[in-house]
Amino acid sequence: MPASRKVYMISGGVTKFAKAHPDMDFRLMVKRAFDYAMNDVPKLKASDIESTRISYFSDHFARQLKAASMVQDYLGMNPKDSRRIEWGGATGGQAIQAGWETVASGRNEVCLVAGFETMSHVETWKGNEFIALASDTNFDYPVGGFYTGYYALMVQRHIYEYLRKTKFADIKDEKRAQRAATEEAKRIMAMVSVKNHVNALNNPYSQYPENLSMKGALGGEMVAYPLNRPMICTMSDGAAVAIMASEEVAFKYTDHPVLIKGVGCGTDTMRLADRPHEKVPIFSWETDEYYSKLKYPGVHSFRAGRTAALEAYKNAGIRDPKEELDFVELHDAYASSEIQTYEDIGLCRYGEGYDFVDQGHPFLEGVDYGLELRHRGTLPVNPSGGLIACGHPVGATGIMQGVFALWQLQGTVGKHFGNERLQIRDANRGLIHSHAGTGSSVTVTIMERA
Amino acid sequence: MPGPKKFSKFRDVMKEVNRKGAALYKNPVGTEDLVILSPYSVKYIHSYAEDSPFFLGLAKGKLLGSECRNCHYKYATPRSHCMNCGHETRWFPLPKVGRVHSWTTCYFGSEEFLKETPFNLALIEFDGVDTLLLTRLKGAKEKDVYIGMKAKAVFKKTPRYLISDVHFVPA
């Protein structure tokens, strides 16, 4: 990002994500997260904040239009520059980049990024309907009307491309081969679910910490084959806040600001049915030959995620994310999309996502998962517990990831979580990934210890 | 007049609110939260606009795709301008038989379709067509369906002018 100024995240705050917060409306939730963030940088005064970027996904859930203006009002930020950010599931990730942008451009020295969602106002099935309205309402919603169904369609094809055609290529009976491949994928998705739920046991902000076993993860109620309940994030109430500052002022407010090293953003068609079948855009360490038989992205992979990662790595000067990242907080709305995302952002090649989990790479060292893992801790993914275990109050989620990454890179997880068990030692660089729609919009942001 | 009833379980609060319109939640954090029912419904006047011929086609038992007049990219889910080159498309009849490109069985869903569960969703691919069509696959259970399975279009006798006027069954 040669033309822009350096931007730092200097503080953050998160409310505990919960099924419902009937004692706090959206303004008070944001205020709590805001006060927490301000208390962490006592030298920063509210008057030093020059602008705000306020994010929430759905007016349907909020049942209050212009809710961002009401947050601005409640926080006492009037009459400063402000705007609402909405980008589906990636609303929070986009809000962080919007905060980065206004500081990077030189317009502001300090920008407050604040997000929330209040999803408890309706029953779960109505909530599913609201979320599904973020699919094409002429061609998709009246058929499925259900996001887990869309993600099940995508992972079924992913399994077909990457397990049926490889590990299970020898089985001649097509239906039997596909079933065997899906069973194998289910086992590995269950491992992701175990990882994220068990990680969350040490995260006091999480909604669903659980000492989940493989038996429990595999035995969950089926929602859309092959995705069952423990493999899917839930709806939540919650808020999160991050404060962004320029290099000129960041070190005035804190000794431990964290640099926004690179940002990236990508998009794809809203309708799954429209996804192209073309060539894979490759990272520097990949070759076209490796993917010569692959039609991309199809419905099996997220071109938006790869595009965002390509841009972010270029901006951050990252050549090999496996070597140069110490952790990743990614948008695991589904255990399946966590695995798909490993491949999109280059933690492994396309087709290697299942093995990446099976071998233990994304698991933390020093946490007991009740699993045999050969290569654990190579690159921890979702040490916080991710969306699956933390919950997913959409407008807050991407900001929450940013705040958890900030604390990892500051080495302050112990202070904020009340225990050190999720602190990754000497964490120097992390990636946060925010994802929307059926993979229609993705942001990737690289954060680095200053 | 008696005030709203008080409950310490939020699930009970929701039940009472649905019945009586208001309830008090004795919150473990120490507050007493007043919760009310706030209904909201709306009827939209929705035009299919440039997609209208597709839905009129369904009512006549026709499945229409669109083909770019310039680069000849073929869309199974129609769009009036090509996403590759930006040129206008023209309508063409899609084959009535295709193959399952991917599928799932939904056991849960959104409010509107909850009563229809379990149901199969499938993306259908057609020979010589570049993109897919999302549809319901009926007449098959979870154990029956597989990628590559042939499927054919079936049309509703009484159209509702919705994409669900067409569904697919195993061919």
Image: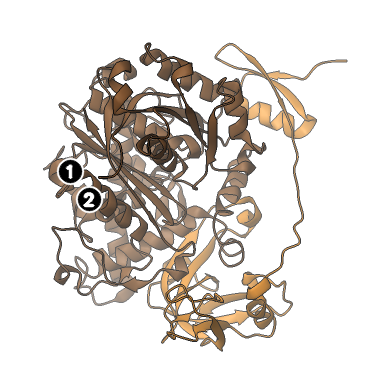
Element under disc 1 = loop
Q: Is residue B83 left or right of residue A381?
A: right
Question: Could one spot residue A282 in this view of the protein?
Answer: yes
Q: Nearer the viewer, residue A96 or A149?
A: A96
Q: Is residue A226 above or below residue A72?
A: below
Q: Amino acid at mark 2?
A: Lys
Q: Is residue A30 above or below residue B58?
A: above
Residue topped by disc 1: A360
Instruction: Supply the letter of whichever chain is brown.
Output: A
Q: Chain of mark 2?
A: A
Q: Nearer the viewer, residue A284 or A412?
A: A284
Q: Residue at x 30, y 25 (%)?
A: A248
Instruction: Supply the letter of whichever chain is orange.
Output: B
Residue topped by disc 2: A314
Q: Is residue A20 above or below residue A372?
A: above
Q: Is residue B13 left or right of residue A278?
A: right
Q: Residue at x 37, y 47 (%)?
A: A443
Question: Could one spot residue A393 in this view of the protein?
Answer: no
